[in-house]
Amino acid sequence: MSHQLKKLGYEKNKCKSCGKYFWSIDERETCGDAPCDPYTFIGNPPTKKKYDLYKIQNTFIEFFKERGHEPIKRYPVLAKRWRDDVFLVGASIYNFQPWVTSGMVKPPANPLVVAQPSIRLNDIDNVGRTGRHLTCFTMGGHHAFNSPDNQVYWEDETIKYCHDFLEHIGINPKEATFIESWWEGGGNA
């Protein structure tokens, strides 16, 4: 991961406010995330081009399609239809758990891209307080399902895709920070 970020011109820093490690191109003291920094994009988008929900979804899908990802149709938000451990889809990876992520079933495409409507209720107390917690949103998911005999891509390529997508839609990489964190959840993914 750090190899790719360094290659893109990012340097590792430690946030003076929250203590998290993050990567940025410009030297900065804070990570750029709330509450360490206020949101500056509300009413002041970081892109010159205006995007509505459907335009940004289509731009995301096309970006990854041009890079070898097969677009798939979104799944229903009612995960209970194929899972017995959760009721609602909370992220695009839910579409593939546990069957695909465990290797029991092949993915519908590999790699793939999906604009997945998602519903989260576990952090509902933060809705309206942070500016980033929502109960319903569309998650842009680009997924590569690796196995011992088929390595599609991993962290370095994921970081490069994210960086390149930000540039593609007109966001200056100097405005972006990559915060070191891990996702823990979703069973076996």
Image (spheres, rainbow, N blue to C red):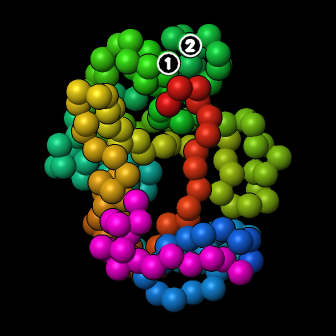
The one of 124 and 157 positioned closer to us in this rendering: 157
Q: Which residue is mark 2?
A: 83
On screen, residue 157 versus residue 47, left or right, reads left
As drawn, 26 above or below 123: below
What kind of residue is marked 1? Pro
Asked which secondary structure carries label 1, the reply is loop
* Distance of label 1 from label 2 (alpha carbons): 8 Å
On screen, residue 158 versus residue 62, left or right, reads right
Expressed as whole percent of the image width and height from the top left, the position of residue 51 reads: 40, 61
What kind of residue is marked 2? Arg
On screen, residue 165 versus residue 14, left or right, reads left
Expressed as whole percent of the image width and height from the top left, the position of residue 44 reads: 53, 77
Expressed as whole percent of the image width and height from the top left, the position of residue 180 reads: 56, 61
Residue 11 lies within the magenta run: yes
Q: What's the residue at 68%, 41% (across, down)?
A: 135
Q: Which mark is residue 9?
A: none
Residue interval drawn in magenta: 1-16
**Most distant residue in the bottom direction:** 27
- Is disc 1 in contact with disc 2, using a CB cutoff of under 8 Å? yes
Residue 176 lies within the magenta run: no
As drawn, 69 above or below 145: below
**Most distant residue in the front direction:** 148
Who comes first in sequence, dot 1 or dot 2?
2
Crowding around mark 2 (Cα neighbors within 10 Å: few <14, some 14 to 19, many 20+) is some
Q: Which residue is mark 1?
A: 98
Viewer-nearest of discs 1 and 2: 1
Q: What's the residue at 58%, 30% (across, down)?
A: 186
Q: What's the residue at 50%, 76% (across, down)?
A: 12
Q: What's the residue at 44%, 19% (across, down)?
A: 102
Residue 159 visible somewhere in the drawing = yes
